[in-house]
Amino acid sequence: MRMPALLVGAFLLAGCGAAPQPGATRPPGATASAIASPSPSPSASPSASGSPPAGVQARCTGSIPTAAPLALVTFGGSQTPTLVDVGDPLHPVTLCTITGPVQSPRIISASEIAYATAGTGSAGSIATIDPSSNTGGTLASWTAGAFASGAYAFSPDASTLAYLASSAAGVELHLVAREDDRTITTLPPVPGRGISPDDDSLMIAFSPDGAYLALVETFTGSGTGAQASFQVRRLDGSLVAGGPPGRTMGTWSGRGGTLYFRDPAGVERWTAPSTVSPILPGVNWIRPQPSPDGRWIAFTQRSDLGLPSVKLLDLSSGSARALVAGATEPFFLTPTTLWYEQARLCGPSDACGMGGPSIGTGATFVYDLTTGRSTPSTIAGVIDTFTPAR
């Protein structure tokens, strides 16, 4: 399971008209994401109650393999989350489709998918569903929705759920374990403003080793300590690091407890208890994505003209190399295959809006790290992936 993944559908930011998609580092309208690594099968997830929210249903074509790499994707012309087997990334096998008011679906295991139901100014919840049996229930809920309500993440063993719920009073960070829902801290309310898709982000994710929870966001202002927009906490909720502001585009490394992020100096890494060291000075990476085996982080970087390229950071050497020019939104399907969207510079007739100086062509590809070749993909967007523990 990779945490967090991209939401299907955007939450509105009060006063701004749009918000980043909770649990992700992508801008509004993006179609794929995730932050974290392969995790063991859940052993003791927070207890669900009741049944899946009305209208949510899975339709499966057969049994779901327990040993295969899985992905939640969309195909051309549809935003319906589809569970596929990506053992052969060039020929994904459709297993199930998920219909209903589902936001930010996550693959918890081959037998469980989590999702949020939320809306600005309305009640919402975090729930699960077993796609094979259409059974499940609600893990957490809130009565009012504002910015980031419904952003969530599970610990690698799925025993702890972290989520955000907010109102005019502020943004609450919750931890749920063994039916105990605790508010850990409340961050300041989000002021009304515009957003920069290349600079603003919201990430909530547990470290792959399960020792820490990180919150990296750019919206709640310049709070410090327990109200900082950059926080690292232990599983008991205690604060390990808080601040300073200006950190964005965070991701845990594929293995262990190293947190990578961007600040005005470039790409840095945080290691417990409080060490911050430079990795790629001067590099403004966008939406980093770690590989399931912990060897790489793929990211987007713009040229001086604004054309995006997909690059790859080798975590063992600390060096980065370019993979594909005119490409964006990289996402690992397997440890050696990377999905991405083709992009070009905006022209005078293009309605690029908040998408910046480039626009997608509609074409997608799979890049093979072993051969260095790109092959057209049938997948239109990637939402989440899951690699079974070996």
Image (cartoon, rainbow, N blue to C red):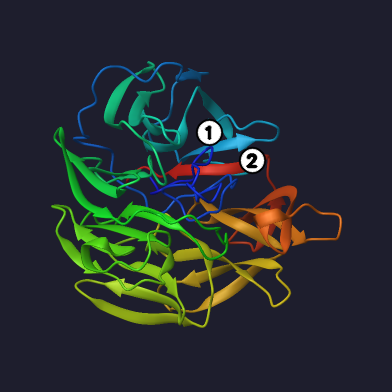
Which of the two residues, 290 or 137, is positioned nearer the viewer here? 137
Q: How far apart are marks 2 and 1 (CA)?
A: 10 Å
Which of the two residues, 306 or 171, is positioned nearer the viewer here? 171
Q: What residue type is labelled 2?
A: Ile
Determine which quarter of the picture holds residue 122: top left
Tag 2–tag 1 contact (CB < 8 Å):
yes
On the question of residue 111 being in view, the answer is no
Q: Residue 38 carries which label?
A: none
> Is label 2 in a helix, a strand or a loop?
strand
> Is label 1 in a helix, a strand or a loop?
strand
Q: Where is residue 56 in the image (x, y as percent from the top left)?
A: 45, 20
Disc 1: which residue: 84
Q: Which amino acid does label 1 sit on?
A: Val
Disc 2: which residue: 379
Residues packed near mark 2 inside 10 Å, few (<14), some (14 to 19) or many (20 plus): many
**374 horizontally vs 144: left or right:** right
Q: Position of residue 140 (x, y in %)?
A: 27, 32
**316 horizontally vs 214: left or right:** right
Q: Check the image and report above or below for 88 versus 82.
A: below
Name the residue rendered at 49%, 79% in the picture. 319
Which of the two residues, 322 or 218, is positioned nearer the viewer here? 218
Q: Position of residue 120 (x, y in %)?
A: 45, 37
